Amino acid sequence: MKRLTHDIMKQLITILLFTLVSGAATSQRKLSEGTISYDIVINTGSEKPQLADFFDGATSTVFLKGPRSRTEMVSSLGTQSTILDPTKNVIAILKEYGEQRYLIQLTPPNWKDANRKHENVQFTDTDEAKTILGYTCKKAIGKLSDGTTFTVWYTPDLIPENTDFQYVNRSLPGLAMEYESNVGNFKVVYTVSKINFSPVPVSKFDLPKSGFRLMTYEESKGQ
């Protein structure tokens, strides 16, 4: 009986060690394709959050396929999509607000100019952690070049192959599961609500051939 117990213990230890090793080897996953859904909450710091009302129930959905990405922000105001497809040298923004539909095509310098606020972001990890959607996330403080700071929770278990879809978080060693964005006096919080690893059709990154008014980046800045 003692020998049997000893043998069983050896087997259990072997299984445990195998599980730990396997878990360590597979816990980090490269995110090269899939769909990431974020819920959006706006804190206006006001007792009359009119702007927040417009964004009540707003979502941001990111479609990834290798180097391609499409980010769709949907709110009661309409939909704004950003498409990045380096395989076709495409950088474009689609704005659909009621009957107003615009297609803005950007050059690489335009894209860099649009994101100049988020250049050279410095992240500092903290000792805090929490679980989001089953993933253990680390808390980091991001600091912009103008001194503005924001909080981001990221998981090192998911490593995006393409990081340009979140310019502000592209230097993080993992996927941002929850992060803040300061827009004027408002604080916008994005939190992952779902991750789907199913294949994304290539057609998702095609530009519309009609129905949109073409606009240059310079023209869009004057809107």
Image (cartoon, rainbow, N blue to C red):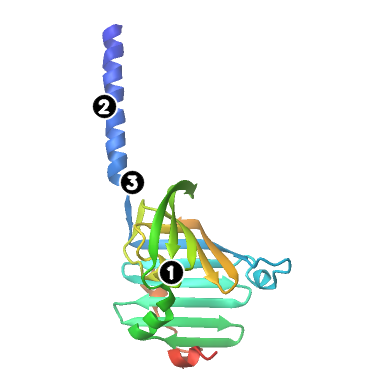
In the displayed orientation, state which residue is furthest to the front: 147
Q: Quadrant of the C terminus?
A: bottom right
Q: Which mark is residue 144?
A: 1
Q: Which mark is residue 14?
A: 2
User: Which residue type carries mark 1?
Assistant: Leu
Label 1: how many residues lie within 10 Å, few (<14), some (14-19) or many (20+)? some
Q: Earlier in the sequence, mark 1 or mark 3?
A: 3
Q: Is 76 positioned to the left or the right of 196 in the image?
A: right
Task: Describe the element under mark 1 as helix, strand or loop.
Answer: loop
Q: CA distance from mark 3 to mark 2?
A: 19 Å
Residue 104 at x, y percent in the picture: 45, 87
Which is nearer the eye, 206 or 10? 10
Task: Describe the element under mark 3 as helix, strand or loop.
Answer: loop
Residue 141 at x, y percent in the picture: 45, 58
**Picture layout, residue 158 above or below residue 2:** below
User: Which residue type carries mark 3?
Assistant: Ser
Residue for point 49% across, 72% down: 72
Residue for point 62% across, 77% down: 77
Residue 184 at x, y percent in the picture: 57, 74
